[in-house]
Amino acid sequence: MKKFFSKKGMIVLCGVAFLALIGGIGSTVALMKDATGVLTNSFSAAQVETEIEEILDGEMGKEPYVRNISEDAKCLVRMSVVITPDDAKIELSDLAENGWYDGTDGFYYYDGYVNERERTSSPLFTGVVWKGADDYSDFEEFEIILYQEAVQVRAQDESGNTISAIDGDGSFNRANAERIWQVFDTGTAGAAYAEN
């Protein structure tokens, strides 16, 4: 019987197979490393958490602020106020002044953004003024119901375009803030996010 490979030929053949195996493993590792690099995401979801914070001063002093208790998200804030009964003889002092504006949609909007763990710089109003009889003979019990909502300062619209209420220099952009609220109200927003 004739030998097909000499001892020297077998060694060469094993060497070639070994190099092919090493080359294949190296390529696989390189491809896996490259693929995992593609999956890196520079954005992460952030949750906005806010609460109403009131400063009460005497019987008629009432100053409602909104506090952002989030750890990692700046936010936009709006509030609504309902007085019941609606014919109560009171008036709210300085309503939607000093940093708030009436959105004419039932909400008052804070004219700025609120940083993490901070509150609005001014209250929605500063107190309650009695408008009835001086002797309170026409007084009826009333309630002031406050409701607030908050969204992140950055979001994506229905087309995937990024909207930011903070310009590159850190200043507040009211027009973009209003767009973010519109997207929020129509329910067409993509995932809101914060930069890492």
Image: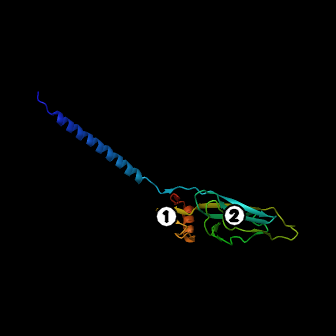
Q: Which residue is mark 1?
A: 162
Q: Residue at x 32, y 46 (%)?
A: 26
Residue under pointer 2: 65
Q: Residue 21 in the image: x percent, y percent?
A: 28, 41
Q: Residues within 10 Å of mark 2 (few under 14, many from 20)?
A: many
Label disc, if present, on residue 7 of the rendered structure = none
- Would you say 87 lies left or right of 34 here? right
The amino acid sitting under disc 2 is Tyr
* Residue that sits furthest to the front in the current view: 8
From the top left corner, tell me how far across and down residue 126 is, in percent. Answer: 74, 68
Residue 83 quadrant: bottom right
Q: How many marks?
A: 2
Q: Residue at x 56, y 69 (%)?
A: 170
Q: Position of residue 80 (x, y in %)?
A: 67, 64
Residue at 60% over, 56% down: 71
Quarter of the N terminus within the rendering = top left
State the scheme by which the image is colored.
Answer: rainbow
Residue 174: name its quadrant: bottom right
Q: Residue furthest top?
A: 1
Q: Residue 119 placed where, x, y %?
A: 66, 63
SS at badge 1: strand
* Quarter of the view holding residue 7: top left
Q: Nearer the viewer, residue 80 or 117?
A: 117
Reading the chain from its start, which is encountered first: label 2 or label 1? 2
Q: Is residue 27 left or right of residue 118?
A: left
Q: CA distance from mark 2 to mark 1?
A: 28 Å
Out of 170 and 109, give the one closest to the viewer: 170
Dot 1, crowdedness within 10 Å: few (<14), some or many (≥20)? some
- SS for callout 2: strand
Q: Are marks 2 and 1 in contact (CB under 8 Å)?
A: no
Q: Nearer the viewer, residue 108 or 138?
A: 108
Q: Amino acid at mark 1?
A: Thr
